[in-house]
Each structure stands twice: as structure tokens, then as C-alpha cells.
Image (cartoon, rainbow, N blue to C red):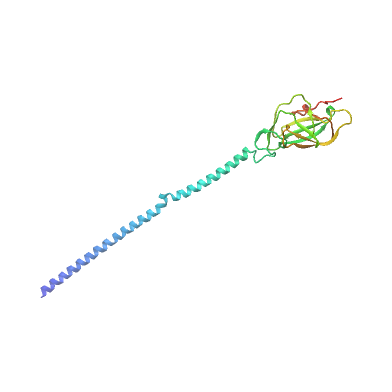
Amino acid sequence: MNRTYTARIRRVALTAAAGVALAASLTACGPDDAEGAGSGGGSAASAGADAPSASGAPDAGSGSGKSAGSSSNGGASAQESASASGGKSAPSGDKKGYGQACGANDLKFSARSETQAGGYILLSARAKPGITCTIPSALPSISFGSKGIEAGPAEQSVGPAVKLSGAKTVYAGVNPKTTNGDNGVEFTSLIVAIGGSDPNPASVSTGAVTIDRPIVTNWHTAPGDAVPGDGTDN
């Protein structure tokens, strides 16, 4: 009985030891598996973190912002260019740009009385600030009053075209009365246009002058060249 009992005890002990060893083995595999599972989860998280970059979503957002900024800058550049080519935000006259033929509204006029050659009106003109234009090779269009008493030519041929800008000035001489006697109508201003088709003639104060068959010279760059003949009609 004692031997049998002792053998049974050994078998139970061996069985228990085997169970403990098996349990220890299962416990040892558990952390490895958990660690593997954790590693897999980490990989998945890493893949998830890398996914926006791989899909290009952040880059696309950044690129979209740059594109919008570029478009905005392009629009600003176009406006600045159009301002530079449009006479820099519309110069003083109604025309835009540079190099066009002058109109009366592009010019600043003044007139004063001179005593030479029996008396005449010296008319001067220069471009308004910001304007560059050309006085064409044509006689100034000068008239007086609502009935449009027009000045005839004081010279047989027209002068050359003249480019105006800044302080560059041209002059024309107007003889208001080329007849003898007391005939005539008094005016205090004249109307000047650059050519007969100028749509915006300007009124220039002259002081009181008697008008009868007036004449006018071409535009000249020197005031001494703009003295009109007397044009006397006996």
C-alpha cells in the first residue's frame, strides 16, 4: 500500500508539474502574441498617420492656397500694368496713354494781349500734368461767340507737328480785327479747338477785344514766331 500510494503521489506530482509547465508555456506565448498584436496595431496606426501624406491631401490643400495667391497676384499685376499703359490712372485730360493727338481737353491754355504789329492775342498751350500728346500739323481752330466767328489763316502753310509734355509750350498769334473802321463785335473770350473735328473745344479768357475778320497763325514753339500779320483789308 505504501509503495502504491507513493507511486500515485509521484504520478500526481508529475501531472501537476506538467500542468504548471504547460501553463507557464502558455503564459510565455501570451505576451509575445500580445506584443505582436500591439505591433500590428502600431503598424496600422502608422499607416493611418501616413495615409493623408500618401493621399496628397495636405499637399493638395497647400498647393490650392498657393494657386489662389498666385491668381490674386496676377490680377493685381494686370491692374498695375493696365494703370501704367492707361496714362497712370487717367491723366488730367480725358484721353489715356501717351502719344495720341492732342485734343483741347488735353491742354492748358492761356492768353495775353500783345502790342506788337498793331496788337494781337498771344495764345499759349501746354499739356496737362500726366499727358503726352502731339499737336498736329494743322491750323488752330479759333472762333468767337455763339455765332462762331472763325479766324482765318495768317500764314500760307501749316507748321510741323509738335509733341507736348511737361513744360513744353506752343504759341499761336490771333489778330482779332483785320479791318479798318469801327466795325466789329466785342468779346471777352475765344474758343479754341485742335482741328475742326475736336469734340471738346476750350474757352479761353482774353479780356475785352473787338472782333472783325480775325486771323490766326500756326502753332509755334517760340512766341516771337507767332506774331500775325496785320491782314488789313482796305
Residue 2 or 156: which is nearer the viewer?
156
- Name the spot of residue 68 as percent of width and height, x first: 52, 47
- Name the spot of residue 186 as percent of width and height, x first: 85, 35
Question: Furthest residue to the bottom?
Answer: 1
Q: How many marks?
A: 0
Residue 103 or 27: which is nearer the viewer?
103
Residue shown at 45%/50% (left/top)?
Answer: 58
Image quadrant holding the C terminus, namely top right
Residue shown at 44%/50% (left/top)?
Answer: 57
Q: Quadrant of residue 83?
A: top right
Question: Furthest residue to the front?
Answer: 147
Question: Furthest residue to the top?
Answer: 156
From the viewer's perspective, is 3 left or right of 115?
left
Residue shown at 50%/48% (left/top)?
Answer: 65
- Name the spot of residue 50 as percent of width and height, x first: 40, 52
Image quadrant holding the N terminus, namely bottom left
- Name the spot of residue 159 as percent of width and height, x first: 73, 26
Question: Where is 62 relative to 17, above or below?
Answer: above
Question: Furthest residue to the right?
Answer: 182
From the viewer's perspective, is 145 left or right of 94?
right
Can residue 206 be seen by looking at this rendering? no
Q: Quadrant of residue 224?
A: top right
Can residue 73 be seen by looking at this rendering? yes
